[in-house]
Amino acid sequence: MSRPLTFAVSDRFADKRPVVAATLRQLLEVAGWPSHQKEGEADLGYGVTATTTLAAADPRAWVGSSNDQPVSREGVMLPAGAVLAGGEIDWVYTAHFFVTGQHEWTETPDGLRHRDPDKAVVRWQLDRHRPVEIAAKKITEHLRRDTTPPPPRPPWPRGKAWAVALTHDCDRIYRYRPRTYFAEAVNLGRSGNLAMAGLQSAKGLYSLAARPFLADPCLTAWQRMIEWQRRAGIVSATYFGTWSRFDRNGHADDLHYDYRDPNLARSAASLTDSGCELGLHFSIRSEATPGQLAREIARFEEVTGHRPTGARAHFWSLNAERPEDTLRTLFEECGLAYDTSLGMNATSGFRRGVGYPYRPFDPMTGKALGGFELPPTVMDEALHLSATTPSGRRQAFRDLLDEARRNGGLVILDWHTDAFLPGYQDDCFPDIVSEIESLLAESECWFARPDEIAAWAARDRWQQ
């Protein structure tokens, strides 16, 4: 195992020193080195002289960094505060800016601030670049210029050069669901929305007539997905929910199915038998309701017989102001190993500027939150929107994979369980099935489950 590198942070950064230290620790870990902070002589210095002294922004730049504007340097969009007077780039500040989501804030015309990940990905060109990993590589170059550091740990196991994980969100099991349509009609009628109540009632009546005679297309599509994976030898992760829109405190956009549904249990068992992973797709209000995540995990155990290793938020619904608060609950209170919720709807790329497993930390205190974020790269909707033709979407998908090949990154695909439904997203998923299957034969690609990737990043990488 490589000896830990040491780093020192100037006292000038005052109460931001723990945040600077957390960022440096994260960068070195991505690069392949364990590290720890020390006072005095160190391998790396931020704002202080060391064997390798890194360019450091004025401490004032670390306060209010969410107001920073993009500038282009070295072919990458960077926060203006990272570009120093002499032209040097503060790569530590750059990494902090992205990995803590400072760039996601946007302002409405009436002056209100909110996070807009899709807009941020486009504005900061994160659909093309991974500035956090670029920062890690730059620091590696500085180290090797000034000294001979110990060999870094490999980014992937068994000589693999990059990694792919196929994941699925189970947002619906049935198209024909009379009971839930009628329940929605009642709720809408009570709220005075009679037009929508009438529409849901009509859907309920149609479902009631169709269900005894027609195979449900959504369930059939999921079964087809499971069979395709089994036949191709693909292992994946499927995230299903245990809290519906009809449960206490349920949101109108939460899932409509009951976690005790027998078809859900059968599908879950089939996936487990095939070596696939099952994870929790937690509800929209769970981040704001004390004890809610624990209740949803208990229901998950009731269905599967085991606790989930990882989770993904329905509608990416982490805490809107401080996503790290939800991650802290998942990791520290619920004991999960990873989350994979920091994704986008309409764009693909690297929401937090990184395409590698990383340890989120509190952006105010620098305290590690206890688990890993596996950043989703592309959702089926985003690929569907990337082009207007099947050939255009296939090319966009190939471009995404090629970027990961070149840079040794991680691609996490997020496809819904009913992606084989005829006409769904203009048959976007069936069009790229062969592209996914070809990855299994690629010697340098590690096709793995998310729980395996999290275990590698947390433990196995450091025990080689």
Image (cartoon, rainbow, N blue to C red):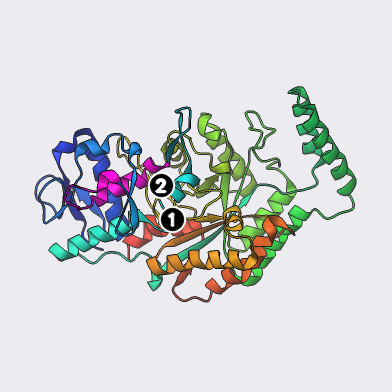
Q: CA distance from mark 2 to mark 1?
A: 9 Å
Q: Which residue is mark 2?
A: 371
Residue type at the position of mark 2 = Gly
SS for callout 2: loop
Q: Is residue 359 magenta?
A: no
**Dot 2 crowding, Cα within 10 Å, few <14, some 14–19, many 20+:** many
**Dot 1 crowding, Cα within 10 Å, few <14, some 14–19, many 20+:** many
Residue 191, percent from left and from top? 73, 23
- Count of numbered circles in the view: 2
Q: Is residue 99 magenta?
A: yes
Residues rendered magenta in the picture: 80-104
Q: Please name the residue shown 52% across and 47% down the image.
A: 311
Residue type at the position of mark 1 = Ala
Residue 187, percent from left and from top? 75, 28
Query: Is 58 placed left or right of 239 in the picture?
Result: left
Task: Give the image quarter of residue 365.
Answer: top left
Rendered-image quadrant of the C terminus: bottom left
Residue 189, percent from left and from top? 78, 26
Residue 398, percent from left and from top? 52, 68
- Magenta span main SS: helix
